[in-house]
Image (cartoon, rainbow, N blue to C red):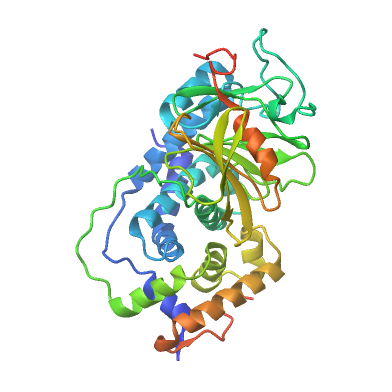
Amino acid sequence: MTSERDVGFTEFVTANRGRLERAARLLTYGNEQDAEDLVQQALTKLYVHWPRVARGTGPLTYSYRILTTTFIDESRRAWRRHERTGSLPAETGVPAPDADTRATVLAALAAVPPRQRAVIVLRYLLDQSVEQTATLLHCSEGTVKSQSAKALATLRIRLADVHTDTTHHGGTS
Amino acid sequence: MTDLAELLDRAAEPAAAHVVPVDSDIARGRAALRRRRAGMAGGVCAAALLVSGAGGFVITRSAATPERVAPAAASHPTTTARSPHPARARTAAPFRGSLGARPFELHYVPPGWKVQGWTPESLVLVHTDGSPHTTVQDFEGKIAIESAAQPLPQTGIVRTLDGKRFRVTTLRSADGSPTPVIGSLTPSYGKGYLVVQGTTGADAAELLKIAAGTVPAGHDGSPALG
């Protein structure tokens, strides 16, 4: 039997799973299994809380929050063996474009601490403002700016060969 | 110059194209919802279902009142957490739970702390005043008791308390600040090793008492739980 929850959730996942996967891929600096686990955890929590979320902040904002907070929480327990609960999605063998640049960027992200990485992903990939990012990460706007500046400094060094412009402020302000 | 947002956008592309059916997300959501509703129903039966399903830390009492303490067995000695012998200090009545399939009891909660709640993987303590109002999945500013498959990294020192040996070390939290962590040296807790993770500035000695006070049921004179 299909419930109202299932209908709304299906519509959301169909429209936004790719967006969450992309964010998770950057958070886990390209580890497809970890990224998929992260998305699964976020979507599971979203499903459980769907009625309240749908009435409140909205599922997209909630999914951003749960994706980043789950990631940060998991990173705090990094010494633990990560248990795999889901199966890997089937791959079609389509090569990614611009593989060298992609690998360089992901390696640069790996050098950025988890919370700073979450700020970068929210600000520059998901186009969240400083205020929105602070709300999502339960921190002050000053902390977001500080974390962002530190992350950009690291990325600027790591991506020097890619001639990256990390001087702009990205996202909405 | 290449824009950072553009670079991130390109790096976020999948290494290989794939499609995950929505049905699998719905199935996981429904399963989690069933577990949550079972937990909300409270009582030993609901908790037993969670234990068998998740293999984590589950308190054998109602999830609706996580701050309340389950009564101890009548034969169990009771003292307060402010005992002059803190290593042996006990809560008025211990929490009873399971790490994996193995039941155990939590006998020590530091003064000024209380149980916030639990997840299938951990029991979470929060400070009685000023703790952040976040979910039990968020450990920031809290103490988390967990069962881990792996022991802690071999750093720090080994301490013995109540005849049990623990590793006392420091790990980095998400913001890079040092966080005291205690881990058992023997895999006798559920999935394996007991881990008590503190928050920045937490007293490692108190965490050690929590670890020593986390006793597999049937040990230390406490009754085994079914």
Q: Residue at 21% across / 67% down in the picture? A: A94
- Is residue B13 positioned above or below B104 on the image? below
Percent coordinates x, y for residue B131 in the rendering = 74, 46
**Which quadrant would the N terminus of chain B be assigned to in this image?**
bottom left
Q: Residue at 50% across / 83% down in the picture? A: A156
User: Who is closer to the viewer here, A123 or A148?
Assistant: A148
- Is residue A67 positioned above or below B30 on the image? below
Q: Residue at 34% across / 80% down in the picture? A: A101
Quarter of the figure with residue A2: top left
Percent coordinates x, y for residue B133 in the rendering = 71, 46
In the displayed orientation, state which residue is furthest to the top: B75
User: Who is closer to the viewer here, B200 or A26?
Assistant: B200
Percent coordinates x, y for residue B185 in the rendering = 49, 37
User: Who is closer to the viewer here, B86 or B150?
Assistant: B86
Quarter of the figure with residue B60: top right
Q: Using the rendered image of the protein, determine whether residue B89 is visible from the camera's viewpoint.
A: yes
In the displayed orientation, state which residue is furthest to the left: A93
In the displayed orientation, state which residue is furthest to the bottom: B1
Determine whether, in the image, residue A24 is placed left or right of residue B224.
Answer: left
Percent coordinates x, y for residue A61 in the rendering = 56, 57
Q: Using the rendered image of the protein, determine whether residue A98 is visible from the camera's viewpoint.
A: no
